[in-house]
Image: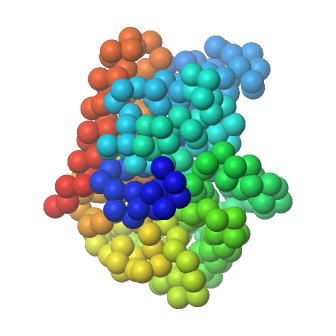
Amino acid sequence: MNTADMTAKMAAGNGFIAALDQSGGSTPKALKGYGIEEGAWNTEEEMFGLIHEMRSRIIRSAAFTGDKVIGAILFERTMDGSVDGVPTPAALIAKGVVPFIKIDKGLENEDRGVQMMKAMPELDALLTKAKGLGVYGTKERSVINSANASGIADIVAQQFEVGRQVLSHGMMPMLEPEINIKSETRAECDAIMLEEILKNLEGMNEQVMLKLSLPVTPGTFDALVDHPKVLRVVALSGGYNRPEACVELSKNRGIIASFSRALLEDLRHQMSDAEFDASLASAIDDIYKGSTQKI
């Protein structure tokens, strides 16, 4: 796939994006969910080796193909690694899966109801490296916890500022101003964030992608789904288990999944390859259905 092929697949492909981008802080929890307890490694390198093997097992699975998984988001260490001797981005492309990379370096402490992204002074170097490895786009996450209008305006503005930096490298930014689904003012957050995103889109000359929490009211983000400056809207599972996330997803026209925990929740290190492939195939089918069959 060349860049034009990847753009076409992101714009109109049937399927969803797998989020395989758990980073340092969330890696022990991801491994525990996979059936590997914290005492199983002695060093950070060993820990990252275990999570890379989990991701490699997913990518090499016969169930994981571009027919239903149209994209995958990688952690930087995963991007730098390989699957059966092939650089990870190339291994994804060979299966028809468009590679993205998580670029944010974590979150600032909460202020005015939001958590902004930490500074990324080495972002240009990372983007140059990723582009050279064939990575198509990026994902950058910040979090909205309550309906503070100025906080949400700033978090959306920061997302678009980073997005323009990504675009300057010829890559596709996936902007992720996540709304905490446990927020007591979640519906108000949806409305304020939507207004701010629409404002910022008016100043864009190029398209972006959006990764959003599923809204309280289905259809809230229809204006973003239909916007000419938005290549695709995808949804995170945000703490929902897979059945719940798929039901909520199916209520929202034009939005596809970009799930992490909801994709991986049934996979275990101890499974045989046949059991692993069957479990992954079942999860992929569920998420594919929620992404493509709307109610």
**Residue 270: image x %, image y %?**
44, 12
Image check: 286 left or right of 167? left
Q: Nearer the viewer, residue 121 or 131?
A: 131
Image check: 14 left or right of 70? left
Q: Is residue 82 above or below residue 225?
A: above
Point out the image quarter for the C terminus: bottom left
Q: Nearer the viewer, residue 2 or 145?
A: 2
Q: Is residue 215 above or below residue 13?
A: below
User: Which residue is pictured at 45% across the width and 74% down the height?
Assistant: 230
**Residue 259: image x %, image y %?**
42, 47
Can residue 155 be seen in this snapshot? no
Specify the farthest residue to the right.
Answer: 121
Q: Nearer the viewer, residue 111 or 56?
A: 56
User: Which residue is pictured at 30% across the width and 31% down the height?
Assistant: 281
User: Which residue is pictured at 72% across the width and 56% down the height?
Assistant: 127
Q: Is residue 75 above or below residue 49?
A: below
Location of residue 90 by image quarter: top right
**Residue 272: image x %, image y %?**
38, 11
**Residue 84: image x %, image y %?**
57, 22
